Amino acid sequence: MTAPSPITVLIADDDPFVRRGVSDIFAATTDIVVVADVEDGDQVPVAVQQFRPHVVLMDLKMKRVGGLDATRVLMTFPNPPRVIAMTAMDVDDLVVQAVSAGAHSFLSKDEPPQTFQQSVRAVAAGNTLFSQESLRRIVDGRPQVATAPSEIDKLSGRERDILRAVATGAPNAAIAADLFLSETTVKTHVSAVFTKLGARNRVEAALVAFRAGLVS
């Protein structure tokens, strides 16, 4: 039986010690391989084209070109890699901007190694690993902007249930089990929720749920 192909990762960070440390985190796994690392955001597009990583771990604050701008460039690519934004802060306004630009998840650099590994696996599988507490800090740390009622009103009752579950960080398989639905049905509902909310990914959809009060 052939083993599945490993998840390939590109690390973008202007601190060589961070790049080395993150590389060491994945060296301890058998299913995640770091194919390259770069020291600034202006090097990311070429590296992505050359190495075709599944996931890019993107520092948001680099010397020449920040991770936010680099993420925006990647999202113009056909079949762009999945981006995990990295920040030294627990919550940074750039995280929200990066998610809006197309980043699929975010990590604080002080997370334990297993969280880095789990996040890459989740994002590569089309899911997102994040904590409700992190999302609460993002919402609490930003000026309160009322969510337009029409955004939530567009959702059916079942879609609201799906959105609440997405906001917990649960993957599709867990949502399917909790709501007694097939995973295919959950995927269909999640896609519909994204479309109706104008959300690019699960983090953006979860933020809408928190701001609208769907999640306490």
Image (tube, rainbow, N blue to C red):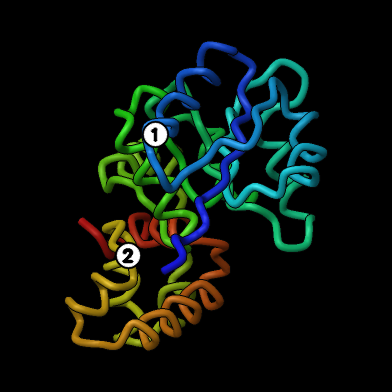
Report how far apart the C-alphas of labels 1 and 2 lie in the structure: 26 Å
Q: Which residue is identified by label 2?
A: 171
Image coords of residue 187 (percent x, y): 42, 79
Question: Image check: 29 left or right of 56?
Answer: left
The disc, 1 or 2, on the residue closer to the chain's N-terminal end is: 1
In front: 121, or 87? Answer: 121
Q: Residue at x 49, y 56 (%)?
A: 124
Q: Amino acid at mark 1?
A: Gly
Q: Residue at x 27, y 48 (%)?
A: 132
Corner quadrant of residue 10: top right
Q: Which residue is identified by label 1?
A: 141
Q: Amino acid at mark 2?
A: Pro
Q: Residue at x 32, y 65 (%)?
A: 171
- Quarter of the image for the N terminus: give it: bottom left
Q: Nearer the viewer, mark 1 or mark 2?
A: 2
In front: 53, or 166? Answer: 53
Image coords of residue 14 (percent x, y): 64, 17
- Quarter of the image for the C terminus: give it: bottom left
Q: Is residue 185 above or below residue 111?
A: below
Asked whether the viewer can see residue 15, the reply is yes
Q: Is residue 196 above or below residue 104?
A: below
What label does residue 159 carry, if any? none
Image coords of residue 89 (percent x, y): 43, 23
Crowdedness of circle 2 by 10 Å Cα count: few (<14), some, many (20+)? Answer: some
